[in-house]
C-alpha cells in the first residue's frame, strides 16, 4: 500500500489516493496508521479521516498541517477536555502525536461505529414531531453545557452524533470555557441564535415550542421578553450568515471552484466540475448550438444541454448593441445576479433552479456576455398546469406557500409571470432570477411585492374562478 508524507498530502490537495499509510509518533513511540476514508479535508491545513491502527482498531484521525498546526491541535484537545469535564459525552481522545517528519500534528479519537449526526436524522425525516424531538435533544445538551459555562462556537446539528442510544458532542476545536461560571442570559441567547440560524426560516415556528424547555433545564422562567430577545438575535445572526454564505459563492472554497483571468470570470460547483463540465465551460456557445433551444430572444438565449447523464440549462445573456454593451460593462452581470439569487434561495430553503456554474466574459474590468448554468427542471409551467388541471387546488396552494416564503424573507421577484414557476415532481420551482431583489426596507418591499402580485394575477384574467381562488389564498399577502 502507498505511504504518504505530510508533504505528499499537502501537494495532493483534495485528490488523496485512499487508502494510504501514514507514519507518525505517539506517546507510545512510532506508529503506522492506514487512512481508510477521508471525512473532511481543508487542503494544506486539516484532514479528518477514518483510520485503522496496526492492531486493526478503527480510530478517527485529525491531522493538522501548516504553521498553525500545533495551535489548532492544542485547541482541539482543550475543547475536548472542556466537553468531557462538563459531563457531556464526547469521543475519547486516545493519543496525540506528530507525523514522522515533524510537519503535522496528529490526534487519534475513539471511532463511533454506526454513528449518525442529528443533521442526517433531520434531513431524513419530514415529520414535525420528529423535528421537535431532535431539537429537544439538542436543547437538553446545550442547556447542560451552558450551565457549566461551556459554549460550542460552531454549533449546528452536524456536531451532535448519535451512536446507539447515546448522544455525543464533537468538534472541540470551537469549544470555549466561560470564565465567569455559567453562561449569562445574553451569552446563552447569542449561542442559541447561532444554532437556530442554521435552519431554514420555515422552521422558526418550532422555536417557541422548544425554547421554554431549554429555560426550564437552566432553572429559568419562560418569559415573552426572552423569546423576543432570541428572535431579534436570530435575525441578526441569520443575516450575518447569509452575507458570508453569498460572498463564498463567488470565491474559491470547499464548495466552489473559482477562476479569474483578464478574459473571464468563472465559478462552478466543485462536485459538478468533471471533464465534460470543463468542456462546456470552455466552449459554451459550441454546446448551445447543439442543444435544444428553449428560448431565443434578443436579451437572452436559453438552451437545454445534455451533458453525460445530466440535463442542464444554459442561459446566455446577450448584448443587443453598443449602448447595451456599455450599460452592462461595469455593473454586475445578470448571470451573476441569477447565480447569487439562486444561492440566496438555497440558503433560505425556497425552491428555485439549482445553480451549477456562471461565466462572465471580460476585458479587464469590463464585462461582456454572461452565462448561467443550472439543472434542468422537468415539468410544465404553472400557467399551463393549473389551467388544464381538473383539480388544481394542491398546485395553487403550493404556489401560495412559496409566495408566502418570499414575502417572509422580503424578496420580490421582479417578473412574476406564472410561466416563471415550473411545476416539478416535488412542487413549484422559481425560474428567471436575475430581477429578484431582497429588500432591507419594509416599505420598498411591500411596494415591489404588490407589483409582483398584480403581475401574477394578470395570468388568470380569462379564468375568473382561478383568479378568485388565488385572491383568497393570497389575501393575507396582499394585505
Image (tube, grey):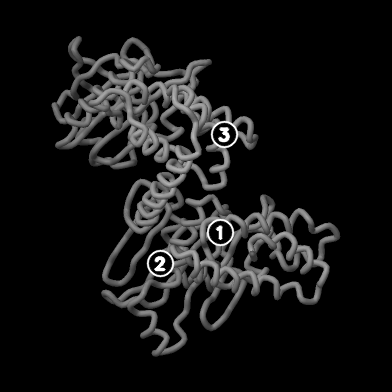
x, y percent for residue 214: 47, 27
Give the spatial CA distance, label 3 vs label 2.
45 Å
> Is residue 376 rendered to the left or right of residue 190?
right
Quadrant in the picture for the N terminus: top left
- The residue sitting at 20% across, 15% down in the picture is 26
Q: Residues within 10 Å of mark 1 (few under 14, many from 20)?
A: many
Q: Residues within 10 Å of mark 3 (few under 14, many from 20)?
A: few
- The residue sitting at 47% across, 43% down in the picture is 228
Q: In this picture, is 135 found above or below 163?
A: below
Q: Secondary structure at mark 1?
A: loop
Q: In this picture, is 468 found above or below 192?
A: below
- Of the two numbered discs 3 and 1 on the same chain, state the one appearing first in sequence: 3
Residue under label 1, please give it: 353
Q: Are marks 3 and 2 in contact (CB under 8 Å)?
A: no
Residue under label 2, please give it: 359
Q: Are marks 2 and 1 in contact (CB under 8 Å)?
A: no
Give the camera-side residue of 133 and 428: 133
Query: Can you see residue 290?
Result: no
x, y percent for residue 165: 53, 15
x, y percent for residue 365: 27, 75
Q: Secondary structure at mark 3?
A: helix
Which residue appears farthest toward the right when viewing the image?
A: 390
Give the camera-side residue of 408 and 229: 229
Give the spatial CA distance, label 2 vs label 1.
17 Å
Quadrant in the picture for the C terminus: bottom right
Query: Can you see residue 225?
Result: yes
Residue under label 3, please give it: 209
x, y percent for residue 238: 42, 48
Give the spatial CA distance, label 3 vs label 1.
33 Å
Q: In this picture, is 106 found above or below 256?
A: above
- Of the two numbered discs 3 and 2 on the same chain, state the one appearing first in sequence: 3
Amino acid at each position: 500500500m502507498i505511504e504518504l508524507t505530510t508533504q505528499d498530502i499537502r501537494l495532493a490537495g483534495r485528490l488523496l489516493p485512499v487508502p494510504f499509510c501514514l507514519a507518525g509518533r505517539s506517546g507510545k513511540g512510532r506508529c503506522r496508521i492506514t487512512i481508510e476514508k477521508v471525512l473532511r479535508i481543508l487542503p494544506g491545513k486539516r484532514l479528518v479521516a477514518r483510520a485503522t491502527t496496526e492492531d486493526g482498531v478503527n480510530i478517527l484521525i485529525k491531522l493538522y498541517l501548516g504553521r498553525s498546526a500545533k495551535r489548532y491541535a492544542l485547541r482541539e484537545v482543550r475543547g475536548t477536555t472542556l466537553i468531557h469535564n462538563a459531563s457531556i459525552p464526547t469521543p475519547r481522545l486516545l493519543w496525540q502525536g506528530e507525523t514522522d517528519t515533524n510537519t503535522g500534528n496528529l490526534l487519534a479519537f475513539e471511532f463511533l461505529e454506526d454513528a449518525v449526526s442529528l443533521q442526517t436524522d433531520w434531513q431524513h425525516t419530514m415529520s414535525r414531531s420528529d423535528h421537535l424531538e431532535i431539537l429537544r435533544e439538542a436543547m437538553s445538551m446545550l442547556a447542560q453545557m451552558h450551565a457549566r459555562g461551556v459554549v460550542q462556537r460552531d454549533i449546528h446539528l452536524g456536531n451532535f452524533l448519535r451512536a446507539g442510544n447515546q448522544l455525543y458532542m464533537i468538534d472541540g476545536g470551537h469549544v470555549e470555557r466561560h470564565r465567569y461560571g455559567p453562561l449569562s442570559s445574553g451569552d446563552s441567547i447569542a449561542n442559541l441564535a447561532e444554532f437556530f440560524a442554521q435552519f431554514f426560516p420555515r422552521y422558526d415556528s418550532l422555536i417557541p415550542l422548544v425554547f421554554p424547555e431549554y429555560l426550564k433545564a437552566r432553572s429559568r422562567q419562560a418569559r415573552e421578553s426572552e423569546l423576543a430577545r432570541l428572535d431579534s438575535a436570530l435575525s441578526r445572526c441569520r443575516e450575518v450568515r447569509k452575507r458570508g454564505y453569498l460572498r463564498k459563492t463567488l470565491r474559491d472554497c470547499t464548495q466552489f471552484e473559482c477562476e479569474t483571468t483578464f478574459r473571464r470570470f468563472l465559478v462552478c460547483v466543485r462536485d459538478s466540475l468533471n471533464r465534460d463540465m470543463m468542456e462546456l465551460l470552455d466552449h459554451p456557445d459550441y454546446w448551445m448550438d447543439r442543444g435544444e433551444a428553449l428560448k431565443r430572444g434578443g436579451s437572452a438565449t436559453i438552451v437545454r444541454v445534455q451533458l453525460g447523464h445530466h440535463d442542464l440549462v444554459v442561459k446566455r445573456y446577450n448584448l443587443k448593441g453598443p449602448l447595451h454593451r456599455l450599460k452592462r460593462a461595469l455593473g454586475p452581470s445578470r448571470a451573476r445576479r441569477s447565480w447569487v439569487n439562486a444561492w440566496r434561495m438555497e440558503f433560505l430553503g425556497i425552491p428555485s433552479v439549482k445553480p451549477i456554474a456562471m461565466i462572465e466574459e471580460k476585458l479587464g474590468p469590463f464585462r461582456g456576455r454572461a452565462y448561467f448554468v443550472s439543472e434542468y427542471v422537468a415539468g410544465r409551467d404553472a400557467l399551463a398546469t393549473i389551467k388544464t388541471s381538473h383539480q388544481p387546488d394542491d398546485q395553487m396552494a403550493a404556489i401560495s406557500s412559496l409566495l408566502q416564503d418570499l414575502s417572509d424573507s422580503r424578496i420580490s421577484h421582479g417578473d412574476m409571470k406564472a410561466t416563471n414557476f415550473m411545476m416539478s415532481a416535488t412542487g413549484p420551482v422559481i425560474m428567471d432570477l436575475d430581477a429578484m431583489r431582497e429588500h432591507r426596507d419594509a416599505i420598498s418591499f411591500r411596494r415591489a411585492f404588490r407589483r409582483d402580485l398584480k403581475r401574477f394575477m394578470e395570468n388568470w384574467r380569462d379564468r375568473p374562478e382561478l383568479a378568485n381562488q388565488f385572491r383568497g389564498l393570497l389575501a393575507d399577502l396582499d394585505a
